[in-house]
Image: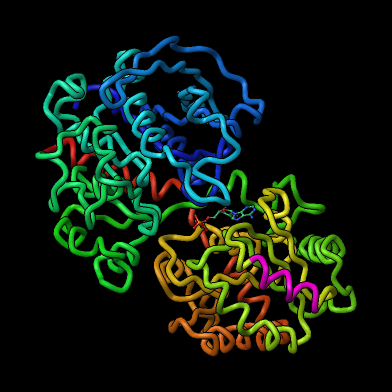
Amino acid sequence: MAGQMKVLFLSPEVVPFAKTGGLADVAGALPGALKRLAVDVRLVLPLYRMVREGGFESRPLLKDVEVPLGSFGLKAVILETKVDDGVPIYLVEREDMYDRPNLYGDAMGDYYDNLERFTFFARAALRVAESIDFRPNLIHCHDWQTGLVPALLQAPPKQAPFFRGIPTVFTIHNLGYQGLFLEEKLPVTGLSREAFFRPEGLEYWGKISLLKAGIVYSQAITTVSPTYAREIQTSEFGLGMEGILRHRKASLHGILNGADYRTWDPSRDEHLPQRYSVKKVEGKHQCKKDLMREMGLDLSLRDRPLFGMVSRLDKQKGLDLLVEILEDILSMDVGLVILGSGEEQIQESLQQAAVRHPKRIGLKLGFDEALAHRIMAGADIFLIPSRYEPCGLTQMYALKYGTVPVVRATGGLEDTIVTFDPRRGTGNGFKFRDYDPDAFLGAIRKAVEYFQDSKRWEKVVTNAMGADFSWDRSARAYLDLYKSLLRR
Ligand code: ADP
């Protein structure tokens, strides 16, 4: 390949513009890390209301771009913005589609026109690249919202002639979100029924799956940890996609996410009342005291372990296990701080527990970036009992903040957390294997036991803070993959 490698990067979420989960962190950090490896990356993102209200500086790039949708075309306006690392971001503006309170839906469920919204996004992204004559060497798509792109590129040339022969990489951040739509909506995508609506195409149990489109039609599939890459090929974790994933095994790669230490590092975190580092860890005590005060916890417990959790409140995250053992945990004279938003039922059971124990449990329902940082810093032990966890970022952040993770051994949690071995002094956290309340409680008891032994605890904390999951390593793995596809 002559000259600089060019990559078009499509993500439905990008930090700091729009975020519901870890995908946004990845899309906010990986392009910059690739740029540092001399790749010319350009990102495309819908201009959601959240982005507009974020007050980011942008400039108009293209007016009245005609984007095909179904049997007609709609116009989009494209704005350009940049983040600190200088990666250009093209924002697709179309008020009737993206100017809404949330990204994908509300309490009533997913937005009824998500197929239109994300077909439009996929096609608009291609039109932008073409309009500014940015012919990438490769297109990197993320999650179901962008899964149509690999399919469009396999369609007869008139669909996207400018992109002929360009390979696509499709990254699965969470197999649980499959982008399912009714068969009769297929015309929205512009893809032909004969060629695409087939079991070996994007058909999934009689429906359209944009996730499956990404899996089937991309040249390479990646997911966000080596263990999750193996797990999703089994019926336990494959959610019905295991067959197709096994079929594409040779093209499926597990690349562990990185942590963005520009925003997640206690020595320069602006959200903290006091910064600290592995060499000068005293500031962490102040963070703990402040957090306990902020959440209304009983300060006489400040020498006891403080547990923290920052999570989407979703079945995936194992909160049912936590609710089952809450009373046992609290009987160890500890405090617990939880920040989360999501399912009504989970919110309610947590609220009930918080009402029963107002001085022991600090609960904040909602999305709060600053509080997430303060919990990372102020807690002693971080809980992640996930049913499954493609990669998980919060355990990596917790490590950096010296907040020792107790995790279920699945996906990226398995790949990043090593159980503490007091004899050898190795390990950075505590793991349990079976999805079972007693197993979880057992790991928590171990953590509390070592917490009470300050020499040993110091060792776990030092090990945790020494872990390095910076993006550079992951970016290099992606670059190697890109190169291997371009050599073919
Ligand atoms: P997932 O992508 O499945 O939600 P990850 O661990 O990969 O899980 O990423 C979660 C990200 O979202 C982390 O950056 C975490 O701090 C953040 N997060 C989750 N819930 C909240 C919340 N209620 N408020 C603030 N940040 C949150």
Q: Main secondary structure of the magenta part?
A: helix
Considering every residue shown, the one lying at the far front of the view is: 184
Q: Is 421 in front, or is 246? A: 246
Q: Is residue 407 left or right of residue 237?
A: right
- Dividing the image into four equal quarters, which quarter contains ligand 1? bottom right
Q: Is residue 287 left or right of residue 177?
A: right
Vertical side of 188 occupied by 176: above or below: below
Considering every residue shown, the one lying at the far top of the view is: 63
**Quadrant of res 117:** top left
Residue at x 54%, y 80% (from the top left corner)? 420
Residue at x 14%, y 53% (from the top left corner)? 199
- On the image, the x and y values in percent for residue 433 come to 44, 82
**Quadrant of res 379:** bottom right
- On the image, the x and y values in percent for residue 178 come to 34, 52
Q: Is 454 in front, or is 158? A: 158
Q: Magenta stretch containing residue 368, yes or no?
A: no
Residue at x 18%, y 40% (from the top left corner)? 485
